[in-house]
Image (cartoon, helix red, strand yellow):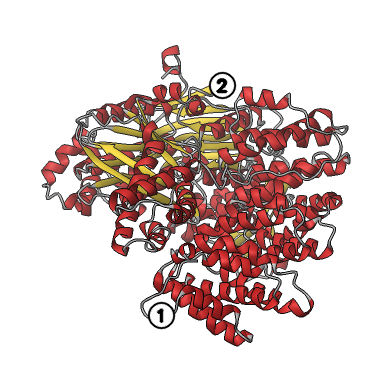
Amino acid sequence: MAENTNGDGPSTSALLQSLYSAPDAPSCTVAARALANHIQTTGLHILAIDAITDDLIRASRSKVGSERESSMIAIEEICRTVGAGGGAEPYLLPLLPVILERYPETGKAEVVGKAAEKAAKQLIKLSQPEGVPKFIKVLFDILSTSGVKWKTKAGALDLFASLVKIGPDQVAERLGEIIPPLTQEMRDTKPEVSTAGQKAAMAVCGVLSNLDVLPFVPVLVNCMARPDTVPEAIKQLSANVWVRDVDGPTLAVLVPLLQRALSERSSIVQRQTVILVGNLFKLVRSPELAHLHLKNLFPGVNRIAETASFPEVREFALQAVNALILSSGADEPTVAALKNTALASTGPSPIPSTPGTPSVKLTDEDEILAQRSLKSLIGKMAHITVNPFIETSISYQAGAVASLVRKRDFDEAQWTRYTVPYLSRFMPAGDAEKIAKENLKRWLEIDKERYYKAAGDDDDDPTEKIVNLTFSLAYGGLLLLNHTVLQLRRGWRYGVCGANGCGKSTLLKAINRHQIENFPESVSTFYVEHDIDGEDADAICLQFLIADKFVKAKNLTPDQISERMREFGFDDARQACKVQSLSGGWKMRLALARAMLCEADLLLLDEPTNHLDRASIEWLQDYLKAQTKVTILTVSHDSGFLDSICTDIIHYQNKQLVYYRGNLSKFVEKYPAARSYYTLSASLVKFVFPPPGALMGVRSQTRAILKATNVTFTYPGAPKPSLMNASCAVTLSSRVGVVGPNGAGKSTLIKLLTGETVPDTGKIEKHPNLRVAYVAQHAFHNIGAHMEKTAVQYIAWRYQDGHDREQAMKASRILSEEEKKQMEVPIEGKNGEKRKLEMIIGRQKLKKSFQYEVKWKNLDHRYNTWLGREKLIEAGFGKLVQEHDDLEASREGSGSRDLSFKVIRQHLIDVGLDGDIAEYNELKGLSGGQKVKVVIAAALWSKPQVLILDEPTNFLDRDALGGLAVAIRDWAGAFLKDREERRRMRKLRWLSDSTGAPREPDTDTEDEH
């Protein structure tokens, strides 16, 4: 041993001698503290130079009990004193096996075991979160050593709880590697080891973040220890309602159990297991994660789907197969290969191991690369030759660096935490900080090469980059984009594509609000939504733009604004119209005019073709393509629109933005899985509408049940009517598409038919018992006041009285001033007595019509009388009659339906909304497409005979459109739809021409219009 001293202090050998010769534990502690201070002052290198570590290991195995105790006390004090400054773990962690060796000490030497426990706890405290995997690896090496004593094993298992508290996220990332060896320890023949193993497993599984599975952790741990309890565990899990996203750690715990359960012979267990698999994988958001577990579960599920004795079990298994394929995005060759894969055994098998997340081995390529990078930087920047002592620290640091790289965590504070304290042990702190920054810079470049190489952007292109930054994006607790690049060039037009719910609209809104980190303040943005704000509806179009705060900032004169409006098709007459009188398409034009007047650098368009007719879409395409100085970022379900305008496609892939040059067609050639943006898919998405109720007295499918006769309607402030002398009729066999240019009156006609508005002249007639389901152009109108409710709660509220509470909101049910005065006009009875009508409270059949029970003002119910329908209408009480007819019709359809949450949930599932979202997610958190499904489902609850959709394709994705088309095709009621879609066939179309009068197409040319 070399004789190192620190100034005038004692030598290392003297300090060690003092330690071993201490007469009692307190004296030993004082000597151990002196040794620890000596190491801290001199530097960690003295551990190797003076062989302090080797001497403590020798003493721990000495035949002299006091020396063994002294070594444990010394290790504890060194960990407390030297470890406090950080960076000492690489040199002290190898002492953990030595400490655990002393746990079995008994009898007079029991004090050695107690000292060892204290030393182990102090050593564990040194670990940083990203260092936890290194500590776990050492513990598993100890557990796998042959001949190790049971107390050492139990002691090692007891330390897992402390490590879980230090690094829960790091433990969660490696559950797939941790659970299998722990399972073996839980089955140890020594009860103490088995118990310690179960405690360790409970602590480890406690890191799960999925609240649905946390209550079942004791069941799962018991199942790991006792495989015979698998059926009971599956029974409990299958009875649970799964609503939260399923992540890697959750699957790491559940998949081994599911794999074992799939081998059970019981049909009951098989049924429960495949249902559970289907439910779980519907909630797996990451295709990579689902694909990782595909090989473990698919063969077993598919075998049950093909060979199960009961048809019901086979059906559930088939649904689970589809869920596995959908969630993993597996292609046909992969599925075919998996179907040919047989299970290793047809009988019960041990619970196998399975990874919880994509491969996270403790020594991988990133760790090796991190070691090389640190070595080169130490030599280059600190001019230090890397020796074995420094190599120990570098190897330890590399593990933490590799973990940060895998998670793409490039926070400078984190990288400083896992680099500077360790480097400072053998170089000045200033040099350590410089190396840490340069190391982070290198890894950022490596990350960029890995993830952004597929961006398809040509760095040699001379076009100006107006945005070039790296950012992350989250919504609520969900990470949408992780450390990805946003790169936009001036004048380029980008289409944003991705699966529903991936965050496309959220990205546009975050950009507009400048919530993207480091977004350049010099870049002005303008966000164009699908409608103009409701509070400006009464303004004149020209004044609306003149008063707009964004337009005001440009200091434009009214004449300049008016001239620019003409470019968007607003002539003098339209400029003088009120905003509320505009159709949806013209409102979109007005929004675009406002955006272009603001001269933004970046134009953000969210579903811009909603409410636009074909001519307007073509105009919009031409206009956008002419904007060579404005960068355009758009989200749209209109594949033709994206194909026409896009110069580039930005695609959401694995929480990254990946860039592809060219339009949507070019993108699909490179990424075939995106073909769903082009075509409707009816293979897996299926809507089922409730059958329409019967109409009393209607035996013919061609008898008119809803009719408009010579109706004229003019919006307040509009110079001319939207509809003039329009007539039409609907029968039970009707399949009608109302087509025509923007502003022709399509939506107005539909609103008149549904009672949303009242005609100026003419009349609307309908069967007294007719129920009409109407989904408006602005579909969220009805649910706007119920955003705190779930979809299930909303339908339960709307129909809780046995009828549709939204009916009372219609304009046709609200009494005008004249009608209120009419209520005061008395009706003369048969005996000449005059009475004033208060309300209608009942109805019954009278020959081919109805009579109504009338409650009179200031009279008891015993004086109620029955009056015929025609007499009441003739007396001016038509609205009250119609209101009561609607009430009775609604009761007939919905009054007999069970309003339990279970039934409502299934109804929403039938209309394409996920059951868990329907029951547990508030309406305010749903996407546009999900809200449309809620509105459709709510309208259909009363089993209507007529369904009217006013531009329903807005907000719905391609798969949902396919499901909607199938449901409409199979539905037995009448159907009306505004806006033509070539993908659907109709028996009849109404054309609304410039006069606003609907007519049937009379030429082949018109039918193709």
Q: Position of residue 259 (x, y in %)?
A: 76, 41
Residue at (44, 79) in percent of width and height = 10
Badge 2 amino acid: Lys
Q: Position of residue 90 (x, y in %)?
A: 50, 59
Nearer to me, 77 or 266 = 77
Q: Position of residue 668 (x, y in %)?
A: 45, 24
Judging by the rendered image, the residue that carries numbered circle 2 is: 987
Nearer to me, 440 or 789 = 440
Image quarter for residue 444? Answer: top left
Q: Position of residue 674 (x, y in %)?
A: 49, 28
Judging by the rendered image, the residue that carries numbered circle 1 is: 9
Q: Look at the image and tell me in which quarter the C terminus lies.
A: top left
- Along the horizontal axis of the image, is 870 left or right of 956? right
Between marks 2 and 1 in the image, the one whose residue lies nearer the viewer? 1
- Give the secondary structure at mark 1: loop
Image quarter for residue 838? Answer: bottom right
Where 207 sits versus 114, above or below?
above
Badge 1 amino acid: Gly
Nearer to me, 934 or 463 = 463
